[in-house]
Amino acid sequence: MIPPLKGSDDAHKAIVWMEEFRCQYMPVVDEGKLLGFISEEIILETNDIDRNVRDFNLIGQQCYVHLDTHFYDILKVAADHKLQMVAVLNEDMTYFGVITVQDTLTSFAQTAAVQMPGGILVLSMNHIDYSLTEISRLVEENHAKILSSILKEDPLDPGKIRLTLKINQQDLSRVVSTLERFGYKVIGRYQEAKPIAGEKDRIDMLLRYLDI
């Protein structure tokens, strides 16, 4: 839905398109090859509205994924480059299009792990104490199932990790009691009071689930 700029397009066209497509960045492509991304900020720094976009200091030359890239990797590439969109390239590195972070979250929000009713737990632990097999066993002792899990470093506690679990129960009291009895620290608990209906609600829950 967001067309690329050609390297020979001028900065004025770039700004017009950014306003038209309501995005902060535009991809720049020449002969099917990604040159990078341009933003209004980059253009304003030079104060040259007539310059060809290929002649600016473009960013994000490595901000791309391939057609079969997973949701998680798309979000990681976007975060690594601090951009809200990622270029998509074919196997021969030919430009195919872009996918935005919002598009990715919307698609991810349709997955079973997000759509199915249940609750979310966030655990903090030392990396050496992490065992999804053991945690799953404790969860299943309470007649529950882990639908999905996400692991990342704890930004507030260096040396520790955060494990975010989506569990197929809305009442998490028994699961939490069991985990805490075995020494696991539960630092977050989110429960759905009713089925998720709208797209915004699904994305909001997904953001809580991703803990971002």
Image (spheres, helix red, strand yellow):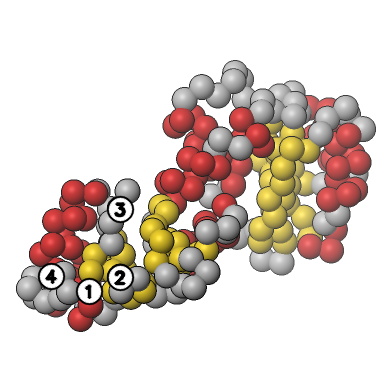
Instruction: Give the residue number, with chain letter if any, for mark 4.
Output: 10
Secondary element under disc 2, as helix, strand or loop, is strand
- Please state the horizontal and vertical placement of residue 199, each as a whole percent of the image: 46, 30
Q: Report which residue position mark 3 lands on.
A: 2
Q: Amino acid at mark 3?
A: Ile
Report which quarter residue 3 is drawn in.
bottom left
- Residue, far top: 194
Q: Disc 3 and disc 2: Cα gap in Å?
A: 12 Å
- Of labels 1 and 3, earlier in sequence is 3
In front of the other: 212 or 77: 77
Tell me the element at label 3. loop
Crowding near the residue tagged with mark 2, few <14, some 14–19, many ≥20 C-alpha atoms within 10 Å: many
Q: Are marks 4 and 1 in contact (CB under 8 Å)?
A: no
Q: Are marks 3 and 2 in contact (CB under 8 Å)?
A: no
* Mark 2, residue position: 29
What residue did someone put label 1 on? 7
Identified by mark 4, the residue type is Asp
Q: Secondary structure at mark 1?
A: loop
What is the spatial separation of the Cα atoms under label 3 and label 4, in whole angstroms? 17 Å
On the picture, is 52 further left or further right than 163? left
Q: Describe residue 65's horizontal placement relative to residue 190 as left or right.
A: left
